[in-house]
Image (cartoon, rainbow, N blue to C red):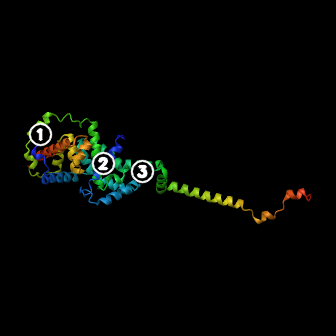
Amino acid sequence: MTSKQGPTPGTDAQLRQALRASLGQSPADGLNDLQARVMAQWTLRTASAEPVAGGTGGVLQLGLYSVRVQVVLLALVLVAVLGWQSLRNHADTSPDDLLEPDVLALMALGEL
Amino acid sequence: MTDTSSTRSSAGFVGHWSGRLVRALEFGATGRPAGGDWALWHKACAGHAPSATELVQALTPQAHGLAMQMLRKNEDAQDVVQESFLRLWSSQPSDAMGAQLATYFHTIVLNRCRTHLIRRREFGTEDETLQQLVEDRQRDDAAHDAELPRASAVQIQHAMAGLRPRQRMALGMWAYADADVADIARALDIEVNAAHQLLHRAKLALRTALIGVSP
């Protein structure tokens, strides 16, 4: 190591600035194909990211990002509500049912 | 295309490295505040195509220019840019630790370039022979202290491309990702003193080359 290896802020700063400036002037010409490929990769990744999402966060992401999943979830909720209502109605015996004559009881009594 | 074995360690290293970049670094192409770029990134990752397009258009030219400086082959540079975007989409904002998106992206590009150079077997220390050390010592050290000549972007990139691969990498990390000697030593898996020597020789070689091309 020579004695001149110490930091020289002025010249180092100049060098860094020159390098950054040169990079800032990088031409964008001829990069359309590359950008198209990058966007194609992004599209594939975005499309394939939805089904592989896992866990609670993944389900939430799916719910946010996929209209189809939202529709399916809504349908499931509707089916669940209708099923619950059906069970509830079946469990509640109406007063009309209670007023119906018990046919078996009547037969046993010899009235039929 | 990409080696997955080094993904985690690379991400950690990128985070450590770019985390040092709390101070604002201007790379000039996008002209947007750093927060704006990260907001675009968030939207792009959420599936917003216009944001992804804007980000790709903003980051690609500099990333390609940087990869060209490091690799000197257009096909390899384009591969690196594609790989780097894949890493960018799957990265976490916490990896950047406050760095601007462009700066963080440069660290990813440099890491991918390093991997390509290793694959191309251009990154060994075999070429750094005694002869090279003798040449470096014989080089006019006045270039180190001389005023940097005005040079065009093309001249600078040409001079950069003339350096040895490890010198290009050290200089690129120092200039475009604000890496210090310790960061360079970690990235290149060399001693800190060796990294110091490498960076010094790279600066000296670039200055000498620029003095040579300036009118």
Residue highlighted by disc 1: B136
- Image coordinates of residue B167 in percent, x first then y, are 19, 42
- Tag 3 secondary structure: helix
Please state the chain letter of the residue tagged with numbered disc 2 in the rendered image: B
- Image coordinates of residue B134 in percent, x first then y, are 11, 36
Q: Amino acid at mark 1?
A: Asp
Q: Amino acid at mark 2?
A: Val
Q: Respond whether the residues carrying marks 2 and 1 are from the same subunit.
A: yes
Distance in Å between CA atoms under marks 2 and 1: 31 Å
- The residue at the point 55 percent across, 56 percent down is A73
Left or right: residue B152 versus residue A85 is left
Give the quadrant of residue A102. bottom right
Left or right: residue A75 versus residue B141 is right
- Tag 2 secondary structure: helix
Residue highlighted by disc 2: B14
Tell me the tag on residue B13.
none
- Image coordinates of residue A99 in percent, x first then y, are 81, 65
Please state the chain letter of the residue tagged with numbered disc 1 in the rendered image: B
- Tag 1 secondary structure: helix
Please state the chain letter of the residue tagged with numbered disc 3 in the rendered image: A
Distance in Å between CA atoms under marks 1 and 3: 50 Å
Q: Is residue A100 visible?
A: yes
- The residue at the point 19 percent across, 54 percent down is A21
Which is in the foreground here, disc 1 or disc 3? 1
The mark nearer the N terminus, 2 or 1, is 2
Residue highlighted by disc 3: A46
- Image coordinates of residue B12 in percent, x first then y, are 33, 47
